[in-house]
Image: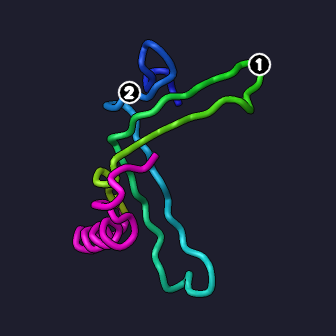
Amino acid sequence: MSANLFAADGPCVLPSRGHFQVHVGTAGLFGALAHNHLIQSERITGCATLDPRDLTRSSIKVEFPTSAIRVIDPKESAKDRAEVQKTMETEVLGITQFPAIT
């Protein structure tokens, strides 16, 4: 990550600058019948705890609201993206029951 993503007081993501993107792939017996998707959240917050003497003791914690995750599949139609979005929110993420991912 570039330095301009972080707050001045420490290695924390600036909410207006960071984003989280995930390529969701398919695999397994029925993988050929499914679709790959690209999802993103721009409302991400988080900080890193760094131990320069022992990096194995370092960690990164990020959080973003599940309602802010968007399907951005560039090769799909707007109609298909909307259908995938609805399925993701209701059947996969359960955004009313699980409002955030940490």
Amino acid on which disc 1 is placed = Arg
Q: Mark 1, residues whose alpha carbon is within 10 Å: few (<14), some, or many (≥20)?
A: few
Relative placement, left or right, of 2 versus 57 is left
Amino acid on which disc 2 is placed = Leu
The picture places residue 36, in percent across and down from the top left corner, at: 47, 70
Q: Quadrant location of residue 86?
A: bottom left
Q: Which residue is mark 1?
A: 53
User: Which residue is found at the position 50% from the left and 64% from the top?
Assistant: 24
Q: Quadrant location of residue 46?
A: top left
The picture places residue 22, in percent across and down from the top left corner, at: 48, 55
Relative placement, left or right, of 46 versus 79 is right
Tell which circle, 2 or 1, labels the residue nearer the N-terminal end.
2
* Closer-to-camera residue (48/85): 48
Q: Which residue is mark 2?
A: 14
* Closer-to-camera residue (96/68): 96
The picture places residue 85, in percent across and down from the top left corner, at: 30, 66
Specify the segment rendered in magenta.
74-102
Asked whether residue 62 is drawn in magenta, I would say no
Identify the secondary structure beneath mark 1.
loop
User: Which residue is found at the position 40% from the left and 41% from the top?
Assistant: 19
User: For the residues marked 2 and 1, what is the alpha-carbon distance in whole angstroms?
Assistant: 26 Å
The picture places residue 6, in percent across and down from the top left corner, at: 45, 23
